[in-house]
Amino acid sequence: MTQKNTQNHVGVDQLTFQNPVNRFPSIEPPQQHQPEPGLDEQLVPKADRGETSYRGTGRLEGRKALITGADSGIGAAVTIAFAREGAEVALNYLPAEEKDAQYLKNLLENEGHTVHLLPGDLTDREFCRSVVDQAHEAMDGLDTLVNNAGKQVVTDGLQGLSDEELEATFDVNILAIFRVTRHALNYLPAGSSIVNSTSIQAYDPSPHIMHYASTKAAINNFSKGLSQELAPKGIRVNAVAPGPIWTPLQVSDGQPKDALPQFGKNTPLGRAGQPTELAPAYVFLASSESSYVIGETLNVTGGQVSP
């Protein structure tokens, strides 16, 4: 039997005193394009997902986590962190992202962690149920759910927003969360944690992605409402609101192409965030260390102010 190692692949920067302004470089991404959903493998420059910098300390030992949108970007960073903290992980992603998912699986299994791959499209109502069933069966249990999958495509204002893009964005970003979470409640025991990915866009919406921003505001509201229902049952619901984080979402029409070189430079830190900088927030909210934190949205925005 392989022994899990939750202490490996240590980067000294995770645990030492550092200036957040220059802990990671201020990138100037070239104009580039990937078709949706985008791959980390093809991103220029590469995003830091914690492969060589995240150290696990056993904070999620024994947990069984389903993570959606888990193959790249923020989801990949959360996957790496959860596995190195001791959790068994089930990864959901679109079939087109198989290459990124296989990379993560190989990386983490070589370290002795258990990883299950569950490709499928969350716009399919039936799949929203079956992915939960598959995760529960594969891990012989389910106690942590991270609703992270998201869709973001820029438009030319409201009049440039097609019905197809509007409906697809709501399907992925909020309706799937309702459906996946609703079915997961058949399995989640007391002590479980649900963490939803929202965004600074929920508070400070950009006109060219107002449909995306609206879904993120809905996720905030959903998280707070559901937290009140589930708290008496011992299930905690919280959310994380990222600011501008460098991921494949940005180059697969998530940002205007001419805006990419300046992406994230409008934050008080003066740079875009890296996916690995989000991971500790998800670990904290999933772990028992946050047992009295319920209905909270933890903002990780590089200093962009939210209510």
Image (cartoon, rainbow, N blue to C red):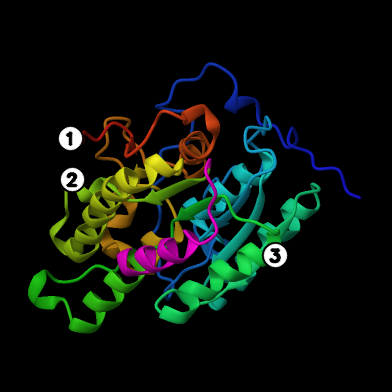
Q: Earlier in the sequence, mark 3 or mark 1?
A: 3
Q: Which residue is mark 1?
A: 307
Residue 290 image point, x, y percent: 47, 30
Badge 3, how many Cα within 10 Å: few under 14, some, many 20+?
some
Name the mark nearer the viewer: 2 or 3. Answer: 3
Frontmost residue, 74 versus 289:
289
Frontmost residue, 203 versus 209:
203
Disc 3, SS: helix
Q: Earlier in the sequence, mark 2 or mark 1?
A: 2
The image's mark for residue 203 is 2
Q: Which residue is mark 3?
A: 138
Range covered by the magenta-colored residues: 174-191
Frontmost residue, 82 versus 27:
82
| Residue at point 56%, 61% (across, down) | 71
Give amino acid for label 3: Ala
Q: Are marks 2 and 1 in contact (CB under 8 Å)?
A: yes
Residue 185 magenta: yes
Find residue 66 and report its image quarter. Answer: bottom right
| Residue at point 47%, 58% (across, down) | 185
